[in-house]
Image (tube, rainbow, N blue to C red):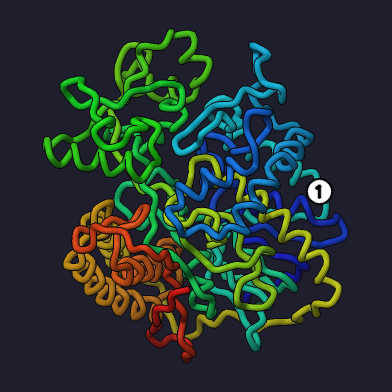
């Protein structure tokens, strides 16, 4: 019999969004945080850039909003953008009070006292950071405070399987423990999905292995709408090295003057955008992709050798040391770079409180579609969104928790009709095939023919995976593959539905941008469990 846990709030994900929400709740509220690996294996931990915040007199909320809207290419929700931009100073103050080690302004130029950098799409220096490892510093700071709270229990190596709903109310979830291989039931009055994005669906990604779209897939299966899944942000500059596993080279390097070069050393970004290296990520990624294909090059180069070695080492110590591991001295050599899938701009549809279509179910951070990013996320708005919506959801949960009835004992996980798998190679092969054709057919530049080919492959894989899932006991790899194939279908169907090129979605069949910007919304049809998931397109 599977173990049952009872909490007031269960949070899926132990990154910035999940831990911030837990810390924002009163200590009288019992909270469980599920981390599918150790708490360090999340996208927050690997974030290098920083947090966008208006802190100086030459900046304003209006400029932050305008920059975000421009990057979002007409698809941002203005109310969301204003709320997030205006919350930024409070977010920075809260983190500083927790002891977040932000980099200070040594030259005493800024009124805030913080060293501010500028990244692509920003018209001002407004990115607060902790050297070039902001996410790592934030994760450590938040985790230290979480561990001090008696009301918060952290379950590491615990993979959420599916949400449990009762009359369109979320009442809990099933979760698989990777250590003892047991499935437990977590009952709660409120469930929060803070499980990150889905970029592991691509062959090359800057994300950790756990970014497999778990929350998006679970919410979709539970009846939530998803939006704008075609907008996958490819970070322009990831370290190109066979052993580097797509280590991210922060946009902050370009903010501090780094130059993109072809193999012959010549510059090229000015041919694609007047902002050059500081153009938004979608433009830079497409430019690099174009030049690599034109030249048949394996990679291009990011050069910051014209800066003094002391400046480079002090501003980018993490990147400097990582590159040194691969015999690249960035004070003397340009960095070989390639684009890689980096951020999921679409996700589960939510309101300003982080609520989804299913009662008592919230989604915050990269797993969600809040309307902040539109067709392209502006650099360093993601960590800000995580904390803003964690705070907003915590307030709403605190207000509504007294009126929410505890679900009581839930149905046990049933393994009576399944056996241990003797064909793990099937999972490995399907995983590999999915990521390869998503990279080849649903990448930076798309066509309808490639998309349709990918969709046909997804349908075949779904049937194989569903059959496998129904016959064998679950494993972590199987659960992630099941989620990835659902997310792949959502990305492809969304891309096929958009008959234009906008932001991160560029198709050779429809290279122009429509005058009217509309969101792509996919809605699950009413269906019995385990049946095919039909979708219909709604524009709004």
Q: Is residue 216 left or right of residue 4?
A: left
Say which quarter of the image contains residue 280: top left
Q: Which is nearer the eye, 421 or 112?
A: 112
Q: Is residue 178 left or right of residue 488?
A: right
Against 82, residue 347 (above or below) is below
Against 261, residue 217 (above or below) is below
Q: Is residue 28 left or right of residue 268?
A: right
Question: Residue at 80% of width from left, 80% of height from top?
Answer: 405
Residue 129, percent from left and from top: 60, 30
Q: Is residue 315 left or right of residue 171?
A: left
Q: Quadrant of the N terminus?
A: bottom right
Question: Residue at 32% of width from left, 72% of height from top?
Answer: 497
Q: Residue furthest front?
A: 515
Residue 221, percent from left and from top: 49, 77
Q: How many marks?
A: 1
Say which quarter of the image contains residue 459: bottom left
Q: From this viewpoint, is residue 432 visible?
A: no
**Mark 1 residue crowding within 10 angstroms, few (<14) / some (14–19) / many (20+):** few
Q: Which is nearer the eye, 406 or 493?
A: 493
Q: From this viewpoint, is residue 332 visible?
A: yes
Task: Check disc 1 and report the residue beneath it.
Answer: 149
Q: Which is nearer the eye, 472 or 252?
A: 252
Q: Secondary structure at mark 1?
A: loop
Question: Residue at 48% of width from left, 33% of height from top?
Answer: 119
Residue 230, percent from left and from top: 37, 62
Question: Residue at 26% of width from left, 39% of height from top?
Answer: 287
Q: Which is nearer the eye, 103 or 8?
A: 103
Against 348, residue 528 (above or below) is below
Residue 466, percent from left and from top: 36, 78
């Amino acid at each position: 019999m599977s173990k049952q846990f009872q909490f007031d709030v269960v949070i899926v994900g132990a990154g910035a969004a999940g831990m911030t929400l837990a810390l924002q709740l009163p200590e009288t509220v019992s909270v469980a945080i599920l981390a599918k690996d150790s708490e360090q294996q999340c996208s927050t931990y690997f974030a290098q850039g920083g947090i966008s915040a208006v802190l100086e007199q030459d900046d304003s909320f209006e400029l932050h909003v305008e920059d975000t809207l421009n990057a979002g290419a007409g698809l941002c929700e203005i109310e969301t953008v204003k709320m997030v931009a205006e919350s930024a100073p409070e977010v920075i103050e809260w983190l500083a009070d927790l002891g977040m080690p932000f980099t200070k302004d040594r030259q005493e130029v800024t009124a805030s006292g913080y060293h501010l950098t500028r990244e692509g799409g920003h018209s001002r220096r407004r990115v607060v950071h902790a050297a070039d490892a902001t996410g790592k510093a934030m994760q450590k700071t938040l985790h230290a405070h979480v561990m001090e709270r008696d009301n918060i229990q952290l379950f590491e190596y615990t993979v959420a399987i599916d949400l449990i709903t009762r009359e369109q109310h979320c009442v809990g979830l099933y979760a698989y423990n990777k250590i003892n291989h047991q499935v437990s039931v977590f009952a709660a009055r409120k469930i929060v999905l803070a499980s990150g994005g889905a970029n592991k669906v691509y062959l090359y990604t800057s994300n950790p292995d756990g970014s497999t779209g778990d929350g998006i897939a679970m919410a979709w299966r539970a009846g939530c709408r998803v939006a704008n899944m075609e907008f996958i942000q490819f970070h322009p500059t990831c370290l190109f090295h066979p052993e580097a596993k797509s280590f991210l080279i922060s946009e902050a390097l370009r903010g501090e003057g780094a130059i993109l070069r072809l193999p012959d050393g010549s510059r090229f970004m000015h041919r694609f955008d007047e902002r050059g290296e500081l153009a938004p990520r979608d433009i830079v990624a497409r430019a690099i992709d174009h030049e690599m294909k034109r030249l048949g090059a394996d990679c291009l180069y990011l050069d910051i050798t014209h800066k003094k070695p002391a400046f480079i080492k002090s501003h980018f110590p993490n990147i400097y040391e990582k590159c040194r591991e691969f015999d690249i001295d960035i004070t003397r050599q340009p960095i070989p770079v390639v684009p890689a899938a980096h951020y999921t701009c679409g996700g589960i549809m939510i309101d300003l409180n982080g609520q989804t279509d299913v009662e008592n179910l919230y989604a915050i951070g990269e797993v969600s579609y809040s309307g902040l990013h539109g067709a392209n996320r502006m650099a360093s708005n993601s960590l800000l969104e995580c904390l803003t919506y964690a705070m907003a959801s915590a307030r709403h949960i605190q207000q509504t928790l007294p009126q929410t009835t505890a679900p009581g004992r839930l149905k046990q996980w049933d393994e009576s009709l399944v056996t241990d798998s003797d064909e793990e190679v099937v999972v490995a092969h399907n995983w590999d095939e999915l990521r390869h054709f998503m990279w080849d057919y649903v990448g930076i530049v798309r066509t309808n023919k490639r998309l349709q080919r990918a969709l046909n492959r997804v349908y075949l894989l779904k049937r194989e995976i569903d059959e496998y899932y129904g016959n064998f006991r679950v494993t972590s790899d199987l659960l992630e593959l099941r989620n990835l194939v659902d997310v792949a279908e959502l990305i492809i169907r969304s891309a096929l539905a958009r008959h234009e090129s906008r932001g991160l979605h560029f198709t050779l069949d429809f290279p122009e941008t429509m005058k009217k910007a509309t969101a792509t919304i996919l809605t699950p049809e009413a269906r019995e469990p385990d049946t095919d998931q039909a979708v219909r397109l709604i524009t709004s």
